[in-house]
Image (tube, rainbow, N blue to C red):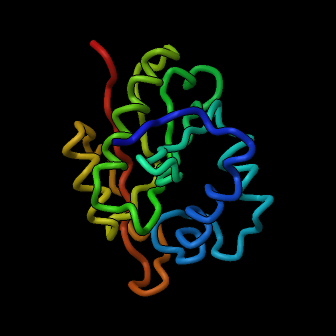
Amino acid sequence: MINIRPFKQNDWEAVWQIIEPVFRAGETYAFSPDISEDEVHNAWIEIPAETFVAVDEKKAIAGTYYIKKNQPGSGSHICNCGYIVAEKARGKGIASAMCEHSQREAISRGFRAMQYNLVVSSNEGAVRLWKKLGFEVVGTIPEAFHHPRLGYVDAYVMYKRLGK
């Protein structure tokens, strides 16, 4: 059973341990693989409207996500989220649970839609999951992501209208 709750500052060490290997691998997020811990803290914790953690039955943090406005002003009715699941916790439905939770959070915060700006096309698991959860590819950006093993790959803009 997964419990999703707001991030607390004393969660940072566990969250950093989840985020760091993903960012260092450079395969799914556009952050530099040599990004500093302080820069990640700023991007994942300080800039977003809120950050959440997924806690497993052993009270270990198994995943994290943030929610924020996708754009300021006239574009602020659409939100953006980022999700990461701990490597040892993958394949257990945690990303699905966080995405569903984030959609409820978005609706409660008055967002009308959710948009992912740069879904790396080679991240097939994420693309498949987001589609399963009702997101559609509304645009393809050719060779938008420089993958460390695959070279330049396409990225998708994915979108879902929320609520009615």
Quadrant in which the C terminus appears: top left
Picture quarter containing residue 70? top right
Look at the picture and state if 142 lies above or below 50: below
Q: Residue at x 34, y 40 (%)?
A: 97
- The image shows residue 55 at horizontal and vertical percentages of 48, 45
Q: Residue at x 29, y 55 (%)?
A: 92
Marker count (numbered): 0
Q: Residue at x 62, y 68 (%)?
A: 20
**As drawn, which residue projects farthest toward the right?**
38
- The image shows residue 81 at horizontal and vertical percentages of 50, 41
Picture quarter containing residue 122? bottom left
Front-most of residues 33 and 158: 33
Front-most of residues 122 and 17: 17
- The image shows residue 60 at horizontal and vertical percentages of 52, 53
Front-most of residues 132 and 148: 132
Please give left or right for residue 146 compared with residue 43 in the image: left
- The image shows residue 8 at horizontal and vertical percentages of 69, 38
Q: Residue at x 55, y 35 (%)?
A: 67
Please give left or right for residue 24 compared with residue 130 in the image: right
Quadrant in which the N terminus appears: top left
**As drawn, which residue projects farthest toward the bottom?**
149
Front-most of residues 73 and 53: 53
**As drawn, which residue projects farthest toward the front?**
58
